Every structure is written in structure tokens, then in C-alpha cells.
Image (cartoon, rainbow, N blue to C red):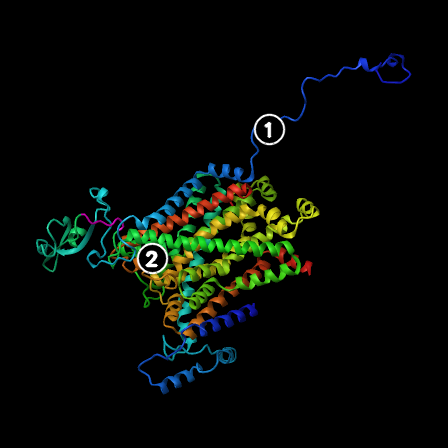
Amino acid sequence: MSKVYAPDDPQFADLGPERFVLTQLDDSILDAKFETKPIGFFKDAAIRFSKSRVSIIALIVIAIVLAMAIVGPNMNEYGYNDQNMDYINLPPKIPAFAKSGIFAGTRVLLNRRVDALGDTSRYPEGCIVHKSNYQVINGVELCDVTVDYYKYSGVDDDVYFMFGTDYLGRDLWTRVWRGARISLVIAFVSVILNSTIGLIYGSIAGYYGGSIDMVMMRITEIINAMPTVVVVTLFILYFGNGLLSIIMALVVQNWIGTARMIRAQFYRFKNSEYVLAARTLGVGDRTLMSRHILPNSIGPIITRTMVAIPSAIFTESFLAYIGLGIRAPESSIGVLLSEGQKVLMHYPEQTLFPALLISVLMIAFNMLSNGLRDAFDPTQRGA
Amino acid sequence: MLITLFIIVTIGFMVIRLMPGNTMYADDPDMSAAQIEVLRAKYHLDKPVPVQYVIFLRGLLLEGDWGTSISLYVGVPVWDVLKAKIPVSMYNNIVSLMISLPLGILSGVIAAIRKNTIVDYATSFAVVIFISVPSFIFATLLQYFAAFKWRLFPIIYDASATGAGKLHSLLLPILALSFSPIARVTRYLRAELAETINSDFMLLARTKGLTETQATLRHGIRNSLVPLANVVIPMFTHIMSGSLVIERIFSIPGMGGLMVSSINAPDYPLTLAILIFYSLVSLVTVLVVDLAYGVIDPRIRIGGRNIE
């Protein structure tokens, strides 16, 4: 028989409080505290980011280039526009590598007359390092001579240029890093402007919606329909090719992408419960936008910014290449590339360093943006 | 679209005519004041800018008259100049697109089928490099090594060559232009296909006895190609702006060099015509994307009709 409580059952007749015992008096039974710390959004992303080895390498590379862009131009005594006619087109020479053969300041001169090699007025004492490829053409004995180009040009022994010099005798080390500085400044400033404009524009369009949204989006469509080449060209035609006008030319169209993305984020979040709750509590429009909805799109914003930087660097050098960008004597990666292109066949090393720099920078920024995207939004990994 | 074109033409015309320092012929020491007056009157430069604009538009719309080149090719109608240059540039761009599409699709499919193997990783690595490094760096590399060092190709464009010789002398610029589109198509197709492979109809295809490769080739790719149109057609505009620099590097007498020299000359009617040409091409591309959607995927067309 089961013990079911019934008031008239005799065995429950003498139920007094003294027959009840509290099973637990000694310790309180509140929820146990988390032993680990709670992880915020940024910490979570940072953990994922730091697990990706490629992103870390990219970050380090970018940091190095940034540091060199800041200190590099001042590391030796040459200015970016110090022309010296005695030091024209010297190959790179680094004292520490002098024995190894590369960066030793040597250059191969093709098809020289063998009988003239002893002439010290043309080949100064001790400049010939190596002779090869002897051949006789029309009865004249020719050979390829590897010379110490610094001695060959009559440059003092203690003078050296780590990246060589250009056709005006300007130090390429200084010019490359100054070029990196200019290119990076253009990229960063234009991207910051893009993001700011896009952020404000997109928030307003996305938050208010309706006819405001429609008009604002129509405007962006018209701006975006114009081909980038045309817009940038017209812009630079009109405002000249100073630093500021190039930055602005990069902003004219590029903010639209950010604006659209922010608008989409606002559409996603503006009708959610927490926004409704905040609005019910009397939070104003501006606070709702900036404090409650916008933080949700911080991940995509950062990722987009990182994607925009390499494309800004690319556009800058592209403009310099076709003669619309920064002009000599000022240096930028694009200027160096287009100057190097002119003497590519004879002095390929003048193209090598800027080309390497822009390639490494672009790859690093792309890797970094991939890593950031994966960190902020793991669902998109590998897309 | 026509409205956008009209806005671009208007802005372009105004910007070019209102440029600071735009006093054409005014400082030429070889001409007398009377000669300058006659020349300015001939090109309508003595009239107010809005009137010039109306004259230009009327000539363009009614007679197809793009104006006359005033300093680069003196006296030659702009249209004749363009007629000689457009085919050269278009040849490059279209051949480059023709090369990149099949190659990109092929490597994208291979990477997707062999996902998470060494092949996939190698492809992804190559994709990052080819997308990141600008096309003019590749052009410079190819020019130095393939043309100058190994003497496989002519260093600059050989205008007299025809047929296979023309392709031979244009192969390096076309290659340099193609790397980035190939990588883009590969990356896109790999991501699309990797998603499609996991869908139910692919499971069914394998259940009825197809191997994974067969199922991917017969059923998977077709579904992944639809969104590809969205990437490929705008890529044409991208290739075109890339070819501005490539043409300069390989001395190809195309639109790129013309644009730069017309700006530097300055030759305003020519600049304007080139800008209109580029706008037209990119607007047509957008239109083609919209139309292509309906053709490639009927669902989109029907869906649109239902909403109306």
C-alpha cells in the first residue's frame, strides 16, 4: 500500500512541525561560480586568430614593413631626392654579404673586347672579378666580364648602397622605404575615410529604412555604376595629382561597399528583441544605432577594412604607373616600379625591390584579412 | 542605364572643359591672335561651356560625330582614332577571359574534388599569390625572364605580325592579365562546389552508383556555374583596367596608352571619348549580368514574374 496523504488517515494524525527535519542547513546551494573566465567577443576572435599560423606571420610581416616605412628612410645619410651624378645606377652592395657573390656590388658586362681589359682608364685597377664566355666575332676576341661596379665607376670603397641607386644616383634604400611610407599613408587614410563615411551612411540608410533608404541606395547605385577608372581619372584630372587628391579619388567610390554592408547588418539587427527592449526603455535613435546595433557589425567592418588596404595600395601604384598618380621626385611604390620598368633590361634590380615589397605587402594583407574573417566569423571559414 | 550614361557623359564633359588652366592654344607663341581666334571658333571653344555641351551632344546623337582630335592626332576624327585602337585592346581582354575561364573552372573543380589534400592546399596557396600580386608585377617578371632572358617571346608588341604571330607576340601580356582572373574563378568555384557536394541531390547521385567524380562533373558543376556569372562578367571590367598598365609595359598601341597620352597632351575630345567608351563597356557588362541570370537560371526569371 502506498503512503498517500489523506487527512482522515490515522497515521498522519499527529503531524507536528517537530517531525520535520531540514535536510540541508549547513551550506547554501547557490549556482556554482564559473571556474573559467567568461570569454568576450574580441577575446574569442583573438584566440581563433592566434591559432592561425599564417595570419600571425602576415601580421609580423606587416609590422616589419610598417616599422621600416617609419625608420627606413632615415637610416642612412642619403635623402630621398639627393642626386649624385657620380653614383649612377649602382648595383646593391651590402658589406656583410660582400664575399657571398650576391649584394656584392658586382655586375656582368657583356661582350667586352679582351684586348681592352688591361686599359686602366676604362677598367680601373682590381675591378675585374671574373671573365667568362670567350668568343671570337669578326676576328675580335670578346668575353663577358664580371666587374666590381663600385670600383668600375670609381666610387670609394667605404660607400655602399644596400638597394643600389637609380639613374639620378639616388639611394634606392631610402626611396623604397619612403615609397612604402607614402603608399601606406595613402592606403590607411583612404581606408579610414571610406569606413567612416560608409559607416555613417550605411547606419542611417539601414536604421531608418523606407523611402530614406531607397533614395540613399539609389544614389550609391549611380555612383557605383561609373567605372572606377573613369571616376579616378576625372577626379585626378580636376584636382591634380597631389597626395590628398589621390586619397580622395580612392574614397569616391570605395565607401559604397562599406555602406552596403553596414546597411545589411542594420537590417538584420534592428528588429531584434534586444533593440525593441532598449527602445522601450526610452533609448534614443542615435544611441540605439551607435551603442546597440553597430557593435554587432564590428567584425565585418574590420575584415572589410583589411581587404580594402591592399586594393588601395594596388590602385595607387596603378595610377603612378599610368602617369596619373604621385609624380617624381616624390617616391611611392608605383613611382619606383614605373621608373624601374624603363631600365628593366639593363638594371633589373631597380625593379626587384619595389616589386618584392608590393608583392609581400599585398600577400600579407590578404592573408591577414582571411585570418580576421575566419576569426570573426568562423562559419565562413575557407569561403 | 541610359540615365547613368547621360550623367557620366555630362560630368565627364564638364570636368574636362572646366579644368583649371584650360585655355586651349592661348599660349602658343607660333600663332597670331587672329589664328588662335579662328582655331578656337572652329572647335567652338569660344562659346560658353553649356553651349559647347549642346553642340557636342547634338553631333554625337544625330551624326555619330565624336568630335575631332585637337592635339594628339590633329584633324583626325576621334572615332577614327578609336576605331584603330579598340580592336587591339579588346583582342587582349577577350582572349585573356577565354583563357582564364576554362583554366579557372578546371583548377577550381580539381581543388574541390580533392578537398583537404595536398592538391587543394597547393591550389589555395597559388590562388592567394595570384590574387595578391598585381598583374603588372607579373608582366614585368614575364617580360624580363620569358622575353629578355630566355628569348621565347618578343619583348614588346610586334604590330606587323598577323595570325599566330600576333598571338605569339601578345601571349605574355595576355598571360599577365589572366593570372588574377584564373585565381578568382578558382577560389569562387572551389567554395561553391565544396558547398554543393554536401547537398542532398549529390548524395542521391552517389547512392544510384555514380562515383564522386562523376557525380561532381554531371550534377555538381552545373549548379555551381550559376553564381559564377556574377563573378565572371564584372571581371571583364577588371581585366580592362588592368590592361591599361599592361599595354604600357608591352608598348601595345591600345586604349590604355591612348588614354594616358590624351590626358597628358591634353586632347580633350579624345579623353572624353575614351571615358565614354569605358563607361559604356562597364554599363553593358552590368546589363549582361542581369540578362544572363535569366538565361542561365530560369528560376530567377520566374521568381521575378511572380513578385510582379
Q: Amino acid at mark 1?
A: Phe
Q: Is B131 or B174 nearer to us in this picture?
A: B131
Provide the major secondary structure of the magenta segment: loop
Residue of label 1: A34
Residue A331: image tag: 2
Disc 2 element: loop
Question: In this picture, is B120 found above or below A347?
Answer: above
What chain letter is assigned to the residue under label 1?
A
**CB under 8 Å between discs 1 and 2:** no
Q: Is residue B153 something one can see in this rendering?
A: no
Q: Earlier in the sequence, mark 1 or mark 2?
A: 1
Dot 1 surroundings within 10 Å: few (below 14), some, or many (20 or more)?
A: few
Residue shown at 45%/63% (left/top)? A232
Residue A23 location (% of width, % of height): 73, 16
Which residue is pictured at 34% across the width and 50% down the height? A356
Is any atom of residue A21 visible in this view?
A: yes
B206 relative to A54 in the view: left or right: right
Disc 2 marks a residue whose amino acid type is Ser
Residue A1 screen position, x and y as percent: 85, 14
Q: Which residues are magenta?
A: A158-163
Q: Position of residue B101 (x, y in %)?
A: 46, 55
Q: Are marks 1 and 2 on the same chain?
A: yes
